[in-house]
Amino acid sequence: MPTDNLQFTPHIKLEFKINEKDFFVAGESASRVKKTLQQLGLHQDIIKKVAIIIYEAAMNVAIHGNHGMLRIYIDPESILVETDDEGDGIPDIELAMQEGYSTATHEIREMGFGAGMGLFNIDQCSDELHIDSKVGTGTKLQAKVYLRKKDSISDP
Amino acid sequence: MKLFDVQKILEAEVLCGDDLLHKDVHNWFACDLINEMLLYVTPDTLLLTSLTNIHIVHTAQVMDAIGVVFVGGKRPAESVITNSKLYNIPLLTTKHLTFECCGRLFLNNLHDPTVVKDATNAYR
Ligand SMILES: Nc1ncnc2c1ncn2[C@@H]1O[C@H](COP(=O)(O)OP(=O)(O)OP(=O)(O)O)[C@@H](O)[C@H]1O
Ligand SMILES: [Mg+2]
């Protein structure tokens, strides 16, 4: 298992700025991080989950969140993907998490997005997910992927 | 099956990456939703889509897809082709629509049992 070497993984922080309607940074940051994780020798399932989370979360900031930051923290136990934006916020997070719920415009849909699957996908790919949102202020999303199975069972 | 077999079967025109057509296609996935591609595309999958914007190239790159076939005679902008060249992702275009393309590829035995069919197994 490549994940056995993780105690030697350095603490790494990667940071990307997301401007409004910057639809490129999602793909670019996802591939940049993917390369880094591959160099660290992480398992491809982990890399895939992290790439999906980054892509969806960064796209959400670019589309719905006005502008913001994407940060990825890599440590020996987990990878944390964090977005922080200054958009309109999410009034009903539970509703937004539902598969198929979307406020995306026709223009966004034409690009192949706006199916309302992003947050649902992020939830499926992460071991821990926190979304903090204030209407009119912005949204902070934190999604964590564990690198090793936790010794204690924390899942319900 | 190799990419140049796919080119023949779909009567496709190669937009870029003609030097990569010897590559083996392990899976294929036809879809017009980026989120679904993110979920289902495994390495060396060939994408069939009618989306022609830059996201398709980014998605293909992030998911290690082996190439993209644009169906229904769709053509991406020149900038999309330029980007795809940088990433070494071959782009093809065919006049046939999705159903016809899938039928032809299926009949030619490209069907691979390892394609993820059950959404509940996609993540773990
Ligand atoms: N960062 C954000 N700021 C404000 N609203 C958001 C943010 N992220 C998501 N939302 C709201 O939650 C809804 C659901 O998000 P989700 O990512 O699941 O779907 P989508 O972005 O609309 O479409 P898809 O992700 O399938 O392309 C969005 O339509 C939007 O209303
Ligand atoms: Mg989204």
Image: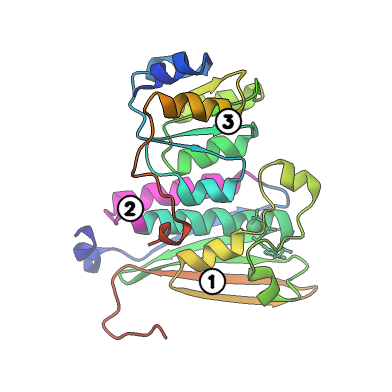
- Relative height, residue A100 to residue A24 (above, below): below
Residue A35 falls inside the magenta stretch: yes
Q: CA distance from mark 1 to mark 2?
A: 21 Å
Is residue A33 among what the camera can see?
yes
Q: Is residue A142 left or right of residue A88?
A: left
Per the rendering, the mark at residue A44 is 2
Magenta-drawn segment: A23-45
Local packing at callout 2 (Cα closer than 10 Å; few below 14, some 14-19, many 20+) is few
Question: Which secondary structure lies at badge 1?
Answer: strand
Q: Which residue is at 62% across, 26% downward?
A: B97
Local packing at callout 1 (Cα closer than 10 Å; few below 14, some 14-19, many 20+) is many
Asked if marks 3 and 1 touch (Cβ < 8 Å), the reply is no
Chain letter, disc 1 residue: A
Q: Quadrant of the N terminus of chain B?
A: top left
| Residue type pointed to by label 1 | Gln
Question: Which secondary structure lies at badge 3?
Answer: helix
Nearest to N terminus: mark 1 or mark 2: 2
| Residue type pointed to by label 3 | Phe
Q: CA distance from mark 3 to mark 1?
A: 40 Å
Residue position for label 3 = B99
- Relative height, residue A97 to residue B78 (above, below): below
Q: CA distance from mark 2 to mark 3?
A: 31 Å
Q: Which residue is at 57% across, 65% downward?
A: A120
Question: Which secondary structure lies at badge 2?
Answer: helix
Nearer the observer, disc 3 or disc 1? 3
Which of the two residues, A8 or B99, is positioned nearer the viewer here?
B99
| Rendered location of residue A61, percent (x, y) | 66, 59
Is residue B88 among what the camera can see?
no
| Rendered location of residue A82, percent (x, y) | 54, 67
Residue position for label 1 = A142
Nearer the observer, disc 1 or disc 2? 2
